[in-house]
Amino acid sequence: MSKIEQIKAMLKENPADSFLQHALALEYIKAGEEELAKKTFVTLLEANPDYVGSYYHLAKLYERQGAEQDAIRVYEQGMAVAQRLGEQHAYSELRSAYEDLTY
């Protein structure tokens, strides 16, 4: 059973598990399934907008696909959430990636 299949099986038992959804999206990226990864990250962040780690990976995915404005929007959303939650490390990573893209 592949990692993707294993994570999907766990998600059947707990479909709202943000950690598992995030892990599934990362596995999709590794498998070259960027559209499935993007859909998974978007769905995750719609359901749990405070899951800070997914903003970085979704924005990077948009960058790789040449969708810079979408990446900028996601970085900005992620920075706002990280700041509100007091997640300084996540904020710094998002800010650095944002600045690399916009400056």
Image: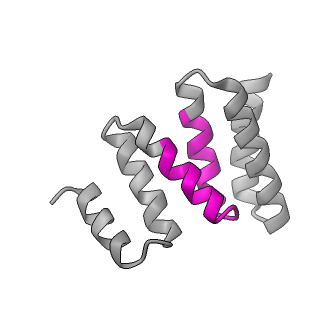
Picture mark count: 0
Judged left or right of residue 68, residue 76 is right
List x then y, in percent, for residue 53.
Answer: 60, 56
Position of residue 29 in the picture relative to residue 4 (left or right): right
Camera-side residue: 13 or 64? 13
Up the image or down, 17 lies above or below 95; here it is: below
Tell me which residue sits at (55%, 55%) in the image: 43
Q: x, y percentage for residue 55?
A: 64, 49
Name above or below for residue 68 compared with residue 27. above
Q: Is residue 89 magenta?
A: no
Q: Is residue 103 placed above or below 74 in the rendered structure?
A: above
Where is residue 7 drawn, in percent x and y?
A: 32, 64
Q: Residue at x 54, y 51 (%)?
A: 41
In which quadrant will I find the C terminus? Answer: top right
Q: Residue 49 colored magenta?
A: yes
User: Residue 51's x, y, as percent?
Assistant: 63, 63
Query: Front-most of 23 and 9?
Result: 9
Q: Nearer the viewer, residue 12 or 41?
A: 12
- Residue that appears at 67% across and 25% down: 68
In the rendered view of the protein, which quadrant contains the N terminus? bottom left
Residue stretch in magenta: 38-61
Overall secondary structure of the magenta stretch? helix
